[in-house]
Image (tube, rainbow, N blue to C red):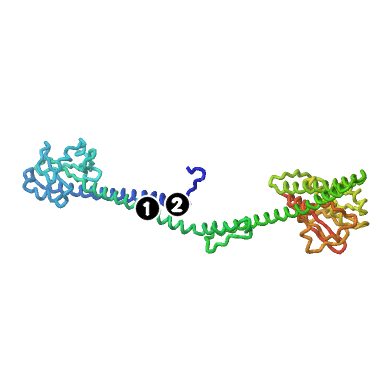
Amino acid sequence: MLGRGQSSSLTATLALVFAATTLAVFALVGSYVYLALAHEVQTQDDLDIVLATRHTRRLIEELTNTSDLRVHRDRVESQVLGNEALSVEVRDANGQLLLEHNRVEAADRLAWPSDAIGAAQQITPAAIVRLSAAHDTPFRRIAALARLADGSNVTIIVTRNMHDRWLLLDQYRDRLRFAGAAGVLLAFLMSYLLMRRALNPLRAIARSAENFTVDNLASRIKVGNVPQELQTLIVSLNTMFTGFENGFNRLSRFTADLAHDMRTPLGNLRGATEVALARPRSSEEYQTVLASNLEECDRLSRMIENVLFLARAEHPNFAKHTLEFNVDDELLRIAEYFEGIADDAGVHLHVSGEGRLSADVELFRRAVSNLLANAVRYTPRGGNITLDAQLRDGTMRVAVTNQGVPLDSALLDRVFDRFYRADPSRTSSHSTSGSTGLGLAIVRTIMELHRGHAYAESEPGVTRFVLTFPMNRS
């Protein structure tokens, strides 16, 4: 088990796995070949024993008596001549040795089954008995009865000394082990080199990824001739780097815009305070300065609140409380809330439409309220603002339309960016500096939370902000 700070080489690990697999294959194949050879050798030896015993019995049964065995000794022994591992014995009914060739006394000391002779009347490989003792050379032996012409019986014992086979199989096993060990070592070395070569594209990807830093966010992984399996990895990493770059750029712009926008109210606070302290003033003048400072503090407070909302909304665990409600009732409630502000601005509010929507009511109110506040700010006195809701193509379409100077078509997508403000020429005379530049950005974030969409349309004399809520959301 690797401790903290330790790591293993992927190349070495894969090479070891391949070597272990090779060892297992060699062991299985070697064992099979060894056992097959041992079985084949035993089968051939048993066949030699059976044939020698059958021919010997046929020759003995042609003789008249035991005396003829000595006369025709050469004929009887000829069945095992030429094979030093085979020996033959002929014994009479009393166990006296009548004839022997290559007799091995070590085999006589081994236990001989009492029923081996009776069971060997059918001279077959099944009648062969294996004799061996611990750390001694094994023998294979068969015993059979033969009847002479005078009616007497003799016992034929053919023994096979397995010492040469024992040495042969031992040498073969040793060679298999040596070949297996050499093959595993060779497999490890070759697999290590091949794996190291195969992982070269991965190391190239790692080296290329090192170029992606805060100072070089535009860097991407560029590796040629990579395997198909690694192409998906490169695409995924480049996509991730693109996301990092966009997020970092957004954060940089957001920080810069926030610092810039906060500098204005802070500068106003500082300037008004310095002017007030420059010389003694009346209580009414001090009250005016304090009221102005309070407005700037309110503006800073709204800005901070909006920034915190955007930060919370971008968190994956941001919770929504979805309910089903009547859209027209909510639009009427929002319009009623803005009625006093609209009267002060000299604009008229109109509400139309119907339908039911499943969404977070508080977020819905905030999105529409931000659009309505923006419309009031940029609508000239005497103008009209319309809040409309329609069910169209499986979506609930909520629109806030106001009269006034239209937006440039090239800027329609930018109005939802954080801290973006339209051309000052669109601002009516009653407009104040109360905007924080985050209202429309909050609208877009709320729509993203609902998997909807927010966009702006503008034509001569009319600007329309539209919210589309999908009716079926998983």
Q: Is residue 146 left or right of 187 when viewed as pictured?
A: left
Residue 416 x, y percent position in the rendering: 77, 56
Q: Residue 185 bears which disc, if any? A: 1
Q: Residue 261: give x, y in percent of width and height.
A: 78, 53
Image coords of residue 309 (percent x, y): 75, 47
Label 1 and label 2: CA atoms lie apart by 13 Å
Type of the residue with mark 1: Leu
Front: mark 1 or 2: 2
Type of the residue with mark 2: Ala
Q: Is residue 347 left or right of residue 234?
A: right
Instruction: Tell me the crowding category of disc 2: few under 14, some 14 to 19, or many 20 or more residues within 10 angstroms, Cα based.
Output: some
**Which callout, 1 or 2, points at the residue further toward the start of the chain?**
2
Residue at x-position 21% and y-position 48%:
164
Q: Is residue 129 above or below residue 182?
A: above
Q: Quadrant of residue 374?
A: bottom right
Q: How many marks?
A: 2
Nearest to the observer: residue 453 or residue 246: 246
Which residue is the site of mark 2?
12
User: Is residue 170 or residue 122 the one in the foreground?
Assistant: 170
